[in-house]
Amino acid sequence: MKYTISTPIPASQILEIKLEFICQKEEKIQLQLPAWRPGRYEIANYAQFIRKLEVSGPDGKIVAEKETKDAWAFFAAENGNYKISYSFHAAQLDAGGSWLDPEQVYINFINLCFSISGRADEKIKVKLELPQSYKVACALPLEDDNTLLASNYQELVDSPFLAAETLHHKIYQVKSSNFHVWVHGEIYFDWDPVLEEFSHFTEKQIEDMGDFPAKDYHFIIHMLPFPHYHGVEHQFSTVITLGPDRLFAKKQGLDRLMGISSHELYHFWNVCRIRPKSILPYDFSREAYLKEGLIAEGVTTFMGDFYLLKSGYYTEERYFEVLEKLMERSFESFGWQNQSIVDSSWDLWLDGYKAGIPDKKVSIYTHGALLVLAMDIMLMQNGKRMHQVMRKMWEYYGKTGIGYELKDFEQAVLDFAGDREDMKRFFEQYVRDTGNLFDLLQNLLPRIGLSVQKGASKAPLQSDFGIVTDPNGQLLKIHPKSPAFKKLMIKDKILSYEPTEEGLKLKVKRWGKNLNINLPADGEIFYGSYKVNSIGNSSAFSQFINQ
């Protein structure tokens, strides 16, 4: 089976694609384009970017009937070679999309390559018609300068590709594995210290997981001139899109680069190999509901940050700031009161990664990471840690490729817990239900020499009155326990406000009408900020870092 992909007019962002393979006489061919991709558990409908699909065989053109929104079928009247030709609009520049312009060709094959019924295990060649000056970044082997080889369909669509004339490439080595760092775009950082830090967090992750069964791994990074932050994991690579590029001359930008890179590398084990049964193997034609978002992204978010602390990149103070940001994002939305992380994981297929209606759900990333922090502290009572749990998950479910369910992860945690009944209650109250995790963390953090307090934010409207607006004064969020919740509406625009002895006097525009609204002040802190501090027991936090 062979794909040929050309870019006759790069500025048009149209890829011209031809798929060729041999058919038997009277064979029915079913072409299924993916509806979603790994690492993003929501329907994407990639078929919307395809135009003018045509099929031809030994006797000329054949009619291909569309069976669903993203599936086509045809009958092969004779033995011989058949061709499917179509165009794809490559205009999505993030870590999961495809993009074409006069300077680069970037393709996630999951966006545009068909799964063919009964042929998923056939070898696939992809010939890319590129300018001779282009360099190629991809985990797939090259047969020649421009032909990629995939052993089957799953490997093809799990191997993103980037080619450009200006493509920076560096390599660092840990044990017997080569780690390739590819960057397209402007570089404002110094390579040597960046590669040194990459090497450090890579070493720590491999040390705790026991091994890294890959000769080569690829970080494929787009440095963009506009604000952006996105990463997607793959079997032997990751794509990362970051911006604005000039920010990476500063520590703030490097923190973003290290944070997302450590996170995506941890996915090499967790998700890419330690995978929930519901996505093993991937069926991209329909939803694959899963309850294990806590493990897939919560564990990965926590461990990605933790290894930057363990490797020495994060200072203690910077790690405290990371925890504070997680708490702000998790607890300043009240979805945790209304939906468990298990149900929020399942509902990714319902409303994707959007905020959704107010206070409906929790994030499997931020809330998940804080749940894992709580588990990790609880495990320390028995001299055990979360990285030991994940190594067991790697040995039992990752290396064997059998996949796991939520109950299997829970059992792995219980096997390392000192107080099994206490850990069982944790899973019931905080994982499967909506327990108050902030109160729990306030009780747990002193065990590792830390404390956390919620205080007023720097924005008085948020703290004192529970009102969050955009820079133009339009209401984005209203605290459900504040007096404002009964008088204001989302998308109201605050024209002006004035503190009074009783509270706050506002002028508001709603649906073209100007309203005068008074809010009482009751002394509560509604939307606040979080502060993590050391409480003097430095040995406890050192144990947390190094155990």
Image (tube, grey):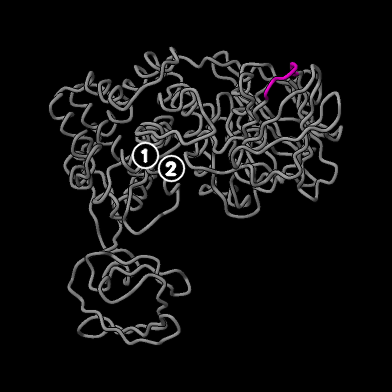
Amino acid type indicated by mark 2 = Trp
Mark 1 and mark 2 residues within 8 Å of each other at the beta carbon: yes
Q: Position of residue 440 (x, y in %)?
A: 18, 42
Among the 4 quarters of the image, the one containing residue 458? bottom left
Q: Is residue 104 visible?
A: no
Assign the C terminus to one quadrant of the image: top left
Q: Helix, strand, or loop for circle 2?
A: helix
Q: Position of residue 198 (x, y in %)?
A: 54, 30
Among the 4 quarters of the image, the one containing residue 162? top right
Q: Helix, strand, or loop for circle 1?
A: helix
Assign the N terminus to one quadrant of the image: top right
Residue corresponding to mark 2? 349
Say left or right for 511 vs 388. Answer: right
Q: Is residue 131 visible?
A: yes
- Residue 407 to residue 167: above or below: above
CA separation in Å, label 1 and label 2: 7 Å
Span of residues in magenta: 23-28
Residue corresponding to mark 1? 346
Among the 4 quarters of the image, the one containing residue 296? top left
Say left or right for 205 vs 178. Answer: left
Amino acid type indicated by mark 1 = Trp
- Residue 246 to residue 230: above or below: below
User: Is 24 within the magenta?
Assistant: yes
**Counting other residues with Cα less than 10 Å from the Cα at mark 2, is it few (<14), some (14-19), or many (20 or more)?**
some
As rendered, which of 314 and 79 lies closer to the eye?
A: 79
Residue at 63% across / 52% down in the picture? 246
